[in-house]
Amino acid sequence: MENQIILDGNLVSKNVKDSLIPRVEKLKEQGVTPCLATILVGDDPSSETYVRMKGNACARLGIDSRRIHLSEETTTEELLKTIHDLNEDTAVHGILLQHPVPSQIDERAAFEAIHIDKDVDGVTSLGFGQTTFGFGRYPSCTPAAILEIIDAYDLEVEGKHAVVIGRSPILGKPVSMMLLNRNATVTTCHSKTQNLPEIVRQADIIVAAVGKPNFIQGDWLKEGAVVLDAGYNKGNIGDVDYESCLPKSSAITPVPGGVGPVTISMLLKHTVDSAEETVKK
């Protein structure tokens, strides 16, 4: 297509991070250093990599990163005690529990234990409810990243038909609500949806969040669709078959270098937002 846009997540992420630097400096002048606490339970290599990446991203902006690494045998009660202690710690402004946790832990109970003021990853049901009503301060970071990209490129949402493929509580569902709050007409599809290609062909905006590599095909798209690929599969492969979707789209995110980098920058932004809230109190 002519005037096609490759939605550069690395650029959007850099702009978000650059905007945070003076805010972090101002907070430090006021005696507050934004602090993100990350909790890793067990020894999953991918999770360890993600936690390390988030810690490095914090360090580059002057944000404190406190890493809590608990053993594979940790109980729900022990994890809840750790979260409670972080809730009470006034030096901590954001709490991130790295997913997944070992099977013996009640993950939902652990997420719900995070205080709403420190739920910078948008994992609590209260945070989801506030996002749905349009006043959530810290929406889930990947949906927030998708909206950040849309805003950065001035893509029209109002009145458009958005099809979201996926209904997870921290991606598909919240991004559907956020697009609805922007006056899009939203269809949420999932594993039980029938005639998925036909539904996708009606979409002005497609959000792929299904967790299947190269799942969305180019012949499913109508000419000029905006494609936002929130999938991240083994081998740096998204949920969208990029090569076949590229010619049909007016704007598309690559993988890697699309939604992923912006997701981390939104986590940092929410942590700084939270630190600023404590200064106001």
Image (cartoon, helix red, strand yellow):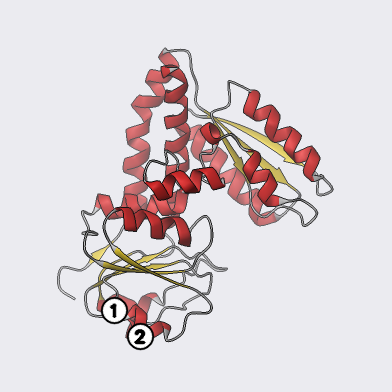
- Pointer 2 residue: 198
Residue 220 % position (x, y): 34, 83
Q: Secondary structure at mark 2?
A: helix
Q: Residue at x 53, y 77 (%)?
A: 191
Query: Is residue 258 something that shows in the picture?
Result: no
Q: Is residue 258 left or right of residue 223?
A: right
Q: Quadrant of residue 165?
A: bottom left
Q: Residue furthest right?
A: 73
> At which x and y percent is residue 239?
46, 72
Q: Furthest-top residue in view?
A: 30
Q: Looking at numbered disc 1 in the image, what kind of residue is underneath it?
A: Gln
Q: Is residue 192 positioned above or below 23 on the image?
A: below
Q: Residue at x 42, y 82 (%)?
A: 196
The C terminus - image quarter: top left
Left or right of 227? Residue 131 is right
**Disc 2 and disc 1 in contact, CB within 8 angstroms:** yes
Q: Residue 202: which numbered mark, if any?
A: 1
Disc 2 residue type (three-letter) = Glu
Task: Name the image quarter holding residue 110.
Answer: top right
Q: Is residue 234 left or right of residue 136?
A: right
Q: Is residue 226 above or below residue 66?
A: below
